[in-house]
């Protein structure tokens, strides 16, 4: 389950264009690799390297103006929940995202329950990972499908994956319904990305999830459902959401 394409789109202009990201990882190689990948994805991002949470929070000016904190670890079990919560308390306006091997799904869910706005398995491609970061910077939540599949009925109950009542829209997140509404208007991925302030790669991931969850073959059939020309009623009109998630393996 998840985006099968590996094409990345250029990041659209939006709230994440000139973001300041803090990479917190005691593993020097992991930290350097993340920094290089982030810089390559968006040269305008400013990256702060920290060996640990203490360095981030106690370093002179290190945490000043941070827009997102990316915690790297070998596995989910190596993530210190107390340090994660300390970062969230000290930087309430900066979403925290963890990148690590899932290892123990229960521990990964604990990390999300502790307030992380995303858990990025190391099995993700760099392009999907960067698209997930764009999504979180835009106000979304990224939850890998492997964690959803390990919960009853695939529903975790986490904030950010609210679903509309009724079928088949119950299978879509609010963010996915926003994308579907624009697909129904004939918008291209680029125009959807501009309208929703996300990257084209994130839009592509949403489109693939929409097609899968609506059990249709392509975006044209999804658009027909959304406009009431398919076997289901159109989704309810709602204001643009502030949160959503992309599910990916």
Image: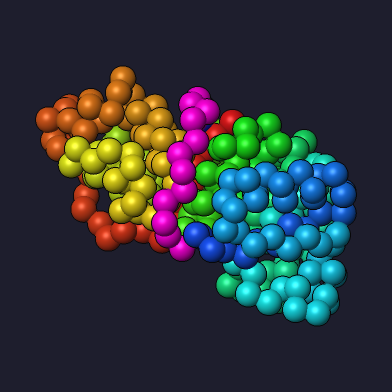
Pick whichever, 242 or 126, lies toward us: 126
Q: Is residue 46 visible?
A: yes
Q: Is residue 179 above or below residue 210?
A: below
Q: Which residues are magenta?
A: 3-15
Q: Residue at x 65, y 49 (%)?
A: 38
Residue 6 versus residue 151 in the image, above or below: above
Could you say where residue 231 lies in the image, as x and y percent from the top left? 17, 27
Dominant secondary structure of the magenta stretch?
A: loop
- On screen, 239 above or below 7? below
Q: Position of residue 114 (x, y in %)?
A: 68, 60
Left or right placement of residue 103 versus residue 152 in this view: right
Q: Is residue 3 left or right of residue 129?
A: left
Magenta span includes 242: no
Q: Residue furthest bottom?
A: 60
| Colouring mode (rainbow / by chain / secondary structure / one colour) | rainbow
Residue 236 place in picture, x, y as percent: 22, 50
The picture quadrant where one finds residue 54 is bottom right
Q: Give me the residue at 52% from left, 28% from top.
A: 6
Q: Nearer the viewer, residue 4 or 34?
A: 34
Do we see residue 166 in this rendering?
A: no
Q: Nearer the viewer, residue 232 or 11?
A: 11
Determine the image quadrant of residue 47. Answer: bottom right
């Amino acid at each position: 389950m998840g985006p099968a394409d590996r094409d990345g789109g250029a990041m659209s202009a939006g709230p994440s264009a000139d973001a300041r990201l803090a990479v917190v990882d005691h593993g020097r190689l992991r930290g350097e690799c993340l920094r290089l990948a982030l810089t390559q994805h968006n040269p305008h991002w400013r990256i702060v390297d920290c060996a640990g949470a203490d360095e981030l929070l106690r370093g002179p000016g290190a945490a000043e103006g941070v827009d997102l904190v990316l915690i790297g670890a070998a596995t989910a079990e190596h993530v210190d929940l107390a340090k994660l919560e300390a970062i969230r308390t000290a930087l309430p306006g900066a979403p925290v995202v963890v990148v690590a091997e899932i290892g123990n799904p229960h521990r990964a869910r604990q990390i999300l329950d502790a307030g992380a706005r995303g858990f990025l398995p190391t099995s993700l491609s760099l392009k999907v990972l960067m698209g997930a970061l764009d999504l979180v910077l835009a106000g979304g939540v990224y939850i890998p499908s492997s964690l959803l599949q390990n919960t009853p009925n695939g529903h975790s109950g986490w904030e950010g994956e609210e679903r509309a009542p009724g079928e088949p829209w119950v299978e879509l997140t609010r963010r996915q319904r926003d994308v579907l509404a624009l697909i129904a208007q004939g918008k291209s991925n680029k125009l959807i990305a501009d309208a929703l302030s996300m990257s084209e790669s994130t839009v592509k991931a949403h489109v693939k999830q929409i097609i899968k969850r609506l059990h249709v073959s392509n975006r044209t059939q999804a658009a027909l459902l959304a406009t009431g020309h398919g076997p289901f009623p159109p989704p309810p009109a709602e204001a643009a959401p502030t949160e959503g998630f992309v599910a990916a393996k």
